[in-house]
Amino acid sequence: MLKQVTPLVLIAAVTACSSPVDRRQANDGDEYINAVVEPALIIPDGLNTPVYSKEYEIPSIGNKSDVKLVGKMLDIRPPLQVLPMAEGTHVEEGSDNIKIVVESIDNDIDLKKELYDVLQSYLASRSIAVLSEDYDNGLIETDWLESKEVIDSNLWGSDEVYLLRQRYQFHVDVRPHGRSGNISIDLIDHEESFDGEQQDIVLSGEDKRRYTIDMLNNAVAYMSVKRAQSIKAKRIKESLGIDVAIVKGSEPDVEVEEFAQSYWLADAPFKRTWERLRIVLPELGFEIIDMDRGKGLYYVNVNDDSGFWSSLWNEKELPIDEGSYRLILKESGENTELYLHSADDQPLDNAVVEAVYEGLAELMKEDRKVR
């Protein structure tokens, strides 16, 4: 008994697909390339030359044009474009290789290691084997990538298969300052076969560009996802509250002029504490006038526009006089010390520092929503 086959399957079985070569050529014939340019009309003496429209006039071929790219030799495929989709990337293109410039988005992460790890992870995600790698020189060379495509499917015989095999080399180059670098890609081996027979293929520069652009775009798209995940993870980490303790100093002694100043101790590294203060200080009623991160210094003015102190102290007066002050940050291992000074860089009374502490600690320990 014969197996029933739907007409749709039969149509699919007997209809041959277009080959990769066919897709780059224009449909129908190319008889136009044999067209003969007719000479202009000869106008007898005494008659006026008619006016000819130049609307459909074909311009002459320039010196840089390739006169061989006509008929079936003309590639009609639209050009591919490098898409710098990942955060902190833009494009540079060479003649035979494609390069994308990558900027660092986190000073705490080694850029070369980030790019190298992303490429390794991308290749692994696509089950692409790595033939060789050299981290010091930033090189990753892939094994053969195989792509099969059925050109003609036959229910009663073997399919005609087009096989594409390629190998690529990625190069990661980071500048000495470590803030920017680039990823370039080269197509180093290329083979094509149809129905088991090796094809004698000589790739043009445009063909190489198309293949490398396609591969690089996929890698950059993968990098975009990884960088987005990294940025979100960092925002979540930075959104978490920071505990702040008060370290009380000693009161001034009659016989000893110097005294130990009270200060705040943030349970976070300098960078994270610095960034959190940029958010907290205005909410606290400290207007940031200027800052010098290298010196760990905030220049602030105190006002009560935020309303925070009023709600905290039940309409009592601010525990610090309005005016200009300095907030000084000092690294202390994994913690950060905060000192509040006057505008002329003199330590404030311990009572003032301890009074402001309650409001500062409350805002610093709040978890913030991640946008």
Image: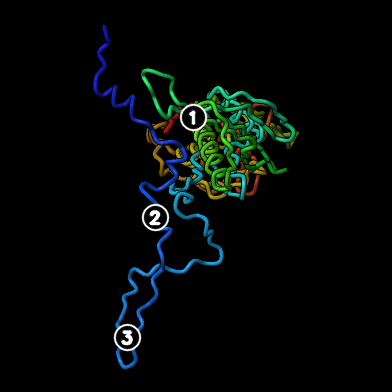
Using the numbered discs, state the Cα–Cα distance from disc 3 to disc 1 in whole angstroms: 58 Å
Helix, strand or loop under label 3: loop
Find disc 1 in the rendering and name its residue. Answer: 162
Which of these two is toward me, 219 or 347? 219
Choose top left, top right, bottom left or bottom right for residue 107.
top right
Which of these two is toward me, 158 or 252? 158
Find disc 3 in the rendering and name its residue. Answer: 49
Q: Are marks 3 and 1 in contact (CB under 8 Å)?
A: no
Q: Residue at point 41% right, 33% down?
A: 371
Rendering coords of residue 191 (x, y %): 59, 33
Rendering coords of residue 285 (x, y %): 46, 41
Q: Amino acid at mark 1?
A: Tyr
Helix, strand or loop under label 1: strand
Horizontal side, residue 221 vs residue 248: left or right: left
Q: Are marks 2 and 1 in contact (CB under 8 Å)?
A: no
Circle 1 crowding by C-alpha within 10 Å: few under 14, some 14–19, many from 20 = some
